[in-house]
Amino acid sequence: MLILGIDPGSRITGYGVLDVTTSQPLYVASGCIRTRGEDLAQRLAQIYAGISELIGMHAPGEFAIEQVFLSKNADSALKLGQARGTAIVCAANHGLPVSEYAARQIKQAVTGKGGADKAQVQHMVTAVLGLEGAPQADAADALAIALTHAHARLGLIQQGRYGGGRGRGRGSSWRDFRPS
């Protein structure tokens, strides 16, 4: 079964597709939907069309997306919410179950650290999936969302809770995976 992970944005929406037929998620595809123009309605239509095309191309069985986070810029937060809503409606219109994860939960699941930065997430996604090169930042975030959902399906993390059971002094941490 395939999982489609989405990192929503009104200008750039990242996507990542993973095969979770086995207990080890396998990379299928990733990239970015880049919208053009200044009209928000047209950009949302482009996001819908792009995700619809991805669903038609890959036929995922499940859809995962990042939850809304609070922003100091209300206008940016509203646009992000609209892009996110567009993606969720597209998934629902295609009959896909939708799972949502908080940014902190995604970072915790992928890096072992809820406060990880984008570079750490990108590095761990590359390492965990055995990719030859690092994907673009938005695509890496989408793959991290799909990985988080794969971990939740396997019971490695609990949905709705932060953390993957890797506290200080236990298991591995980001320090173990930093490139030299």
Image: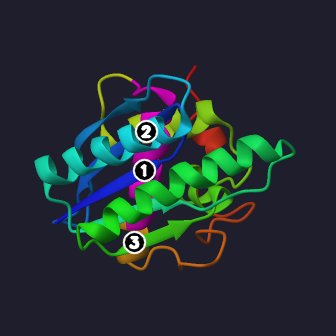
Q: Do the CB atoms of the residues marked 2 and 1 lie less than 8 Å apart? A: yes
**Distance from label 2 to label 3 (Cα)?**
16 Å
**Residue toward you, 150 or 33:** 33
The image quadrant where one finds the N terminus is: bottom left
- Report how far apart the C-alphas of labels 3 and 1 lie in the structure: 11 Å
Tell me where residue 156 sits by quadrant. Answer: bottom left
Q: CA distance from mark 2 to mark 1?
A: 6 Å
Decide which of 144, 57 is in the foreground and name it. 57
Front position in the image: 7 or 82: 82
Does the segment drawn in magenta span residue 135?
yes
Reading the chain from its start, which is encountered first: label 2 or label 1?
A: 1
Q: Which mark is residue 14?
A: 2
The mark that comes first in sequence, 3 or 1, is 1
Residue 173 seen anywhere in this rendered image of the structure = no
Q: What is the span of residues highlighted in magenta in the rendered image?
A: 134-149
Q: Label 2 amino acid?
A: Gly
Q: Nearer the viewer, residue 10 or 173?
A: 10
Q: Residue at x 39, y 56 (%)?
A: 146
Q: Amino acid at mark 1?
A: Ile
- Which of the labelled discs sits on residue 25, or is there none? none
Query: Is residue 18 positioned above or below 41 on the image?
Result: below
Q: Quadrant of residue 29?
A: top left
- Residue on which the image places disc 3: 98
In the rendering, which numbered label is found on residue 6?
Answer: 1
Mark 3 lies on a secondary structure that is strand
Secondary structure beneath dot 1 equals strand
Q: Are marks 3 and 1 in contact (CB under 8 Å)?
A: no
Above-or-below relation of 96 to 83: below
At a point 58% along the width and 19% down the height, the residue shown is 180
Three-letter amino acid code at disc 3?
A: Val
Main SS of the magenta part reads: helix
